[in-house]
């Protein structure tokens, strides 16, 4: 007795299940690209980059103040 041949639809269903699910970020960017024009998208990314850079500078400033405070407190 021979095994029944695999139907094409079953093979496709298996391939679809094996496909990776996109991350939330990827899905959000896809929706963003559909809803906004390129200029708005670029402006939003530039704004977010600026926010992250401001946060980094604030952390650096706080760290520098802490180090200076410790060096001054250590002097007789």
Image (spheres, rainbow, N blue to C red):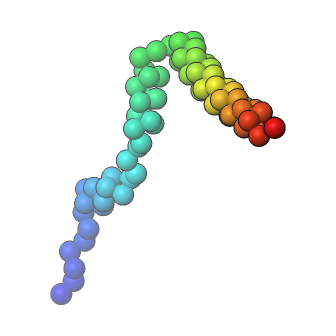
The image quadrant of residue 18 is: bottom left
Q: Residue 35: where, in percent of width, then height?
A: 41, 17
The C terminus lies in quadrant: top right
Is residue 67 in sight in this rendering? no
Q: Residue 36: where, in percent of width, then height?
A: 46, 15
In this rendered view, identify the residue nearer to me: 75 or 48.
Answer: 75
In this rendered view, identify the residue nearer to me: 76 or 53.
Answer: 76
Q: Residue 53: where, in percent of width, then height?
A: 65, 25
Residue lying at 81% horizontally and 37% vertically, measured from the top left: 75
Residue lying at 63% horizontally and 22% vertically, measured from the top left: 54
Q: Residue furthest right?
A: 76
Q: Residue 21: where, in percent of width, then height?
A: 37, 47
The N terminus lies in quadrant: bottom left
In this rendered view, identify the residue nearer to me: 75 or 13.
Answer: 75
| Image height of 38 relative to 72, above or below | above
The image quadrant of residue 10 is: bottom left
The image quadrant of residue 3 is: bottom left
Residue lying at 54% horizontally and 17% vertically, measured from the top left: 44
């Amino acid at each position: 007795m021979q095994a029944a041949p695999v139907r094409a639809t079953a093979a496709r269903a298996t391939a679809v299940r094996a496909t990776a699910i996109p991350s939330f970020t990827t899905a959000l960017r896809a929706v963003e690209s559909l809803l906004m024009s390129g200029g708005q998208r670029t402006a939003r990314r530039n704004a977010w980059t600026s926010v992250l850079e401001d946060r980094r500078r604030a952390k650096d400033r706080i760290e520098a103040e802490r180090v200076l405070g410790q060096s001054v407190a250590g002097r007789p």
